[in-house]
Image (tube, coloured by chain):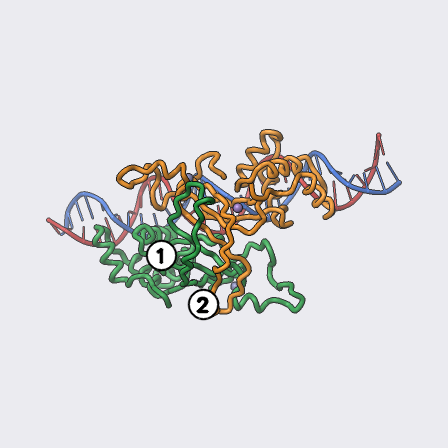
Chain colours: A orange, B green, C red, D blue
Amino acid sequence: MVLAVKSPAELTDLFRDRGRKMTAQRQALFAILHGTEAHPTAEWVYERARRQMPTISLRTVYQTLNDLVAMGELEQLDVGTGSARFDPNLAPHHHLVCDDCGRVQDVPVDFPDVAVPQEVAGGFTVSTTEIVFRGLCATCAHGTRADGTADRAPSQSNHHPHKECHA
Amino acid sequence: MVLAVKSPAELTDLFRDRGRKMTAQRQALFAILHGTEAHPTAEWVYERARRQMPTISLRTVYQTLNDLVAMGELEQLDVGTGSARFDPNLAPHHHLVCDDCGRVQDVPVDFPDVAVPQEVAGGFTVSTTEIVFRGLCATCAHGTRADGTADRAPSQSNHHPHKECHA
DNA sequence: TTGTGAATCAGCAACGACTGCAGATATGGT
DNA sequence: ACCATATCTGCAGTCGTTGCTGATTCACAA
Ligand SMILES: [Mn+2]
Ligand SMILES: [Mn+2]
Ligand SMILES: [Zn+2]
Ligand SMILES: [Zn+2]
């Protein structure tokens, strides 16, 4: 575990400080987020929340996740797996992404030499640097046959993540 | 200009070699792709194609772009700007992305030191490394006021690219 | 407690990007 | 010219996400 989102109590205070109300829905979502160190999608958070609160709406999950992102308590990433991932790790870091199942794993390593040389920047002002390493996770790599062909959708697959493969 | 997609004639040969037919639609699209070194979206290619061939369908544009990607003559990237970008530059390189207008610019620089250390890889097999530098392009940076606030949608804007800002 | 107004929620329609489908059309070898 | 089939067009459908709106709930005060 590297760094998780703040505790439900702390997030509650943050919301209250901003003059916002506290609701059972937010409490439930805060607890779920605090209990995971993965990179969940909105849909995954929704499924989790529904277990405790069957009437919660997907709309509210998106709303709350967006609020937390706007407050800087959660980061949103788009690694091209179809839906946005929400990252509780606020420390600067990079990611490994499985091309097959969509699993996302932190790479808490700093690469100080990575910078855009003046001559190619063309007036661009760089504020963030995101590195995505793509490949196969340990689980998906095992599905490779001796002849090198994979037993799963190969190149431009839609790589729909397997259930629970939201890490 | 770093590297453009192959000429219409060469692409035609490639298609014919694979037993595929040549059509006016493909010819038009090949010409458009060969004439741009930017990172166009399917929609942008469609608008261009429509000028010469008003009846061409967006479906055909997607089809052809997908075909070229499958043949390795074009690369597809998702930099989180809403729609896929198609990249005629097949040489390994990275990208600068404007958070405001969505402009994409090549960074033809190799960073040999960027690798995932064994201890954090967790069994992952890395096949590609993509670096995205985010910030503001020269044009969008000019819209900043003296007090530091921007005159455009700030943080979580939908960053709809300006028209023609497809570079 | 009870009242009040604003914040929030649930549900559903709509949206943008993209794909599946099927009937119409065009290609290229004979 | 003829035919088999690759391709094209148009449209419906999917997926992730957001807009809208009436109903509900919270926070605070009377
Ligand atoms: Mn992360
Ligand atoms: Mn490029
Ligand atoms: Zn995997
Ligand atoms: Zn810009």
What chain is tagged by disc 2? A
Point 60% across, 62% down: residue: B152
Q: Do labels 1 and 2 share a chain?
A: no
Quadrant of the image containing the N terminus of chain B: bottom left
Disc 1, disc 2: CB below 8 Å?
Answer: no
Point 65% across, 36% down: residue: A25
- Would you identify the image quadrant in which residue A139 lies? top left
The three-letter amino acid code for the residue at tag 1 is: Thr
Residue B76's tag is none
Whole-percent x and y of residue A153?
A: 35, 40
Q: Which of B86 and A140 is in front in this view?
A: A140
Give the crowd class for mark 1: few <14, some 14-19, many >=20 residues within 10 Å: few
The three-letter amino acid code for the residue at tag 2 is: Val
Judging from the image, what secondary structure is the residue with disc 2 in? helix
Mark 1 = which residue? B55
Distance from Cα at disc 1 to Cα at disc 2:
39 Å
Judge whether B20 appears above or below A48 on screen: below
Does ligand 2 reach within 8 Å of label 1's beta carbon? no
Quadrant of the image containing the C terminus of chain B: bottom left
What chain is tagged by disc 1? B
Q: Which of B34 and B147 is in front in this view?
A: B147
Judge whether C21 appears above or below B66 on screen: above
Whole-percent x and y of residue B12?
A: 25, 58
Label 1 vs label 2, nearer the camera: 2
Whole-percent x and y of residue B123?
A: 42, 41
A17 to the left or right of A50: right
Whole-percent x and y of residue B133?
A: 49, 59
Is residue B158 something that shows in the picture? yes
A106 to the left or right of A12: left
Judging from the image, what secondary structure is the residue with disc 1 in? loop
Is residue B47 something that shows in the picture? no
Residue A120's tag is 2
